[in-house]
Image: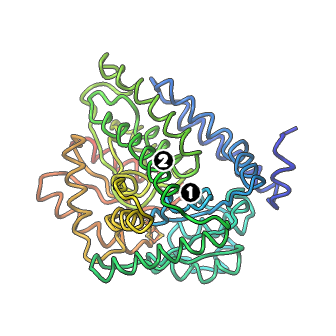
Amino acid sequence: DNPYVSMWQELGLDLAAHDALLNVLGKTYTDFFLTQKNRPDGMGYFDFVMSEVHGLRIKELLDEKSAGRKIIGSYCVFVPEEIVLAANATLVGLCSGADFAMEAVERLLPRNTCALIKSSFGFKLGKVCPYLESADMVVGENTCDGKKKAYETLGSLVNNLYVMDLPQVKSEQGRVLLRAEYDRFKTTLEALTGVAVTAESLKTTIRTVNAKRAAIHRLSSLRKADPAPISGMDALLANQVFFYDNPERFTTSVNKICDELERRIAEEKGVFPAKTPRVLISGCPQAVPNWKLPYIVETSGAVIVGEESCVGERGTRNLTEETGDTVEAMMEAVVDRYFKVDCAIFTPNPERTAHIEEMAKDYNADGVIHYGLQFCQPYLMESFPVERALEEKNIPTLRIETDYGMEDVGQLKTRIEAFIEQL
Ligand code: BJ8
């Protein structure tokens, strides 16, 4: 009796496995999100989006496809949405936030691969992701060694995998490489969609994506208040939905929540009492439905006030300059914007440490939890100098290394509670 079953069937999903996934997702969402107290009413929008994440949103994407648009899947914030939209395509983030079909995955990837990469394979091998199956092109990127080598294998599993090369150093040559790769990407998209990127279309889409980021900035800045008007769980959810919702609708909905949060702040109404210890999370991306760490933190006596993460401020903080009038000038502006993303795959990467310090200060965080996925060399390596730099500034820091499994929840909770107690 589910109206979407035939749609999922046509996409080639494994219906039984997909049902199991939706059941777990629905249960986790209910347990983690709907049990929170004093949630803003505006979160009803996100509850709806999550309940329709494999339903209505997929139907919308398929309708776009029938109207001639293309769907592009991505695993990284270096894939420029402005260019995708300007070429008459829609960008969706492929979440990779849960373990799936692990036995099949470990026949293709070493066991000591990070959970995010394994998950991206698991969703494909388990045939449970309607976004992946709807995509006309999937973009991989040469970021960490794990991803770049894994794409060599993923290329034989998904149809039309495109791999974008990325610089590893923030040098003049690095910027030249990024510009060349964005040009090549634009040309590839134009060939796929049959629509040329024009000055007019790019100008519009730069504004569209900036508006989405500006709405998230507004939400972030309201989290500076004490008591916090929104939980870290709910703010993370908004940052996650950023990757697959319709951009205009997302912007409107987040701004509406912000109106409500402003009223709450005026009334000093919070999700937790005033003076609740405030924590900043920094590190690897937390993709849907990876809500493990924030759930533990916020049920252990603290509130999360920011995410230094690609699903968070690292991904959204910079806007693209809107002053250009030619495609050339706007492509330069797009490159300038993305070249600032301080992912740990860059060496050296001092901007990231500076940004963590700045965020801790801006959001009045009492401490930072560095979230590293097991086997993620870039972020785990950086977690040591980050910890040293923060401790030098008297910002208590806890380094966490974990995966998507639930086996370590008890142990993590003990460590996190002890950390929060000393804040
Ligand atoms: S810009 S953070 S989204 S690459 S967790 S797969 S790094 S081993 S995700 Fe990322 Fe783009 Fe950078 Fe952001 Fe590798 Fe680490 Fe796994 Fe990771």
- Colouring convention used in this rendered image of the protein: rainbow
Quadrant occupied by the C terminus? top left
Q: Secondary structure at mark 2?
A: helix
The image shows residue 381, relative to residue 62, as above or below, that is: below
Residue under circle 2? 208
Q: Is residue 83 left or right of residue 101?
A: left
Q: Residue 256: x and y, percent?
A: 47, 28
Tell me: 333 left or right of 240. left
Q: Taking 412 as reference, is 96 above or below it?
A: below
Above or below for 266 versus 81: above
Q: Amino acid at mark 1?
A: Leu
Res. 388 visible in picture: yes
Query: Residue 42: image x %, image y %?
Result: 50, 27
Ligand 1, what quadrant?
Answer: bottom left
Q: Quadrant of the N terminus?
A: top right
Residue 112 visible in the snapshot? no
User: Residue tagged by mark 1?
Assistant: 85
| Residue 194 coordinates in the image, percent (x, y) | 67, 67
Could you tell me which residue is drawn at 37 percent across and 68 percent down?
A: 332
